């Protein structure tokens, strides 16, 4: 596939490593006869290591078939996370280093996850846009502080810490964005 045909989200192989395209910059030279160049921001699958690649519009890149299966988080097996396929209950196991920072958003029975597979081998997990978590520790609200929007830290049931509005109390269930890690509202 030519570099000019690649879109965000495509998966390509470069130098023996598989990458997912996250961003594309296109540059057109001003002079006559200049070739269009593309700069790709790639992240390795698995691992998520960033790599920048520059290519001409006619350069060939090999696209890799990446399939996605909807799954539910089932349990943790030591350091590994086990997800069950929503259709046929096939277990997919991902190591903690592959899951990475996403581990802070995974709770028992979490639905709407997608396991990414290359040649039927699980390589990455994609979480739903937001998840429901419980506040386990946060300082009490200051009296008279309701007119201002002052955030305060809160530790959640998965161990991560985020900033929440001042009116949130211990034991409350909240929505948290899995992409930004920010408070998304009360349940």
Image: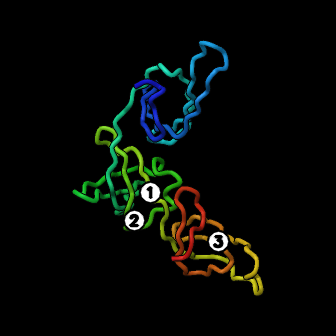
Q: Tell me if residue 148 comes above or below residue 65 in the rendering.
A: below
In which quadrant of the rendered view does residue 91 lie? Answer: bottom left
* Residue name at image x 69 percent, y 82 percent: 140
**Residue furthest to the bottom:** 143
* Residue name at image x 57 percent, y 17 percent: 35
CA distance for labels 1 and 3 = 21 Å
Q: Pointer 1: what residue? A: 127
Q: Pointer 2: what residue? A: 110
Q: Which of the pair 68/8 is nearer the observer? A: 8
* Residue name at image x 38 percent, y 61 percent: 112
Q: Which mark is residue 164?
A: 3
Q: Name the side, left or right, on which 57 lies relative to 168.
A: left
Q: Which of the pair 153/113 is nearer the observer? A: 113
Earlier-in-chain disc, 1 versus 3: 1
**Residue furthest to the top:** 33
The percent coordinates of residue 160 (x first, y second) are 57, 64
């Amino acid at each position: 596939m030519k570099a000019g045909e690649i879109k965000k989200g495509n998966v390509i192989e470069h130098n023996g490593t598989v990458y997912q395209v996250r961003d594309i910059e296109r540059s057109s030279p001003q002079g006559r006869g200049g070739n269009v160049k593309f700069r790709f921001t790639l992240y390795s699958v698995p691992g998520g290591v960033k790599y920048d690649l520059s290519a001409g519009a006619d350069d060939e890149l090999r696209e890799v078939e990446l399939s996605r299966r909807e799954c539910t988080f089932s349990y943790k097996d030591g350091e590994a996370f086990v997800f069950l396929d929503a259709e046929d209950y096939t277990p997919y196991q991902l190591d903690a280093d592959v899951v990475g920072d996403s581990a802070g958003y995974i709770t028992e029975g979490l639905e709407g996850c997608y396991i990414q597979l290359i040649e039927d081998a699980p390589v990455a997990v994609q979480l739903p846009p937001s998840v429901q978590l419980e506040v386990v520790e946060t300082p009490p609200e200051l009296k008279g502080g309701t007119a201002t929007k002052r955030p305060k830290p809160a530790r959640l049931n998965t161990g991560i810490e985020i900033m929440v509005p001042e009116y949130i109390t211990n034991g409350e269930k909240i929505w948290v964005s899995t992409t930004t890690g920010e408070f998304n509202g009360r349940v």
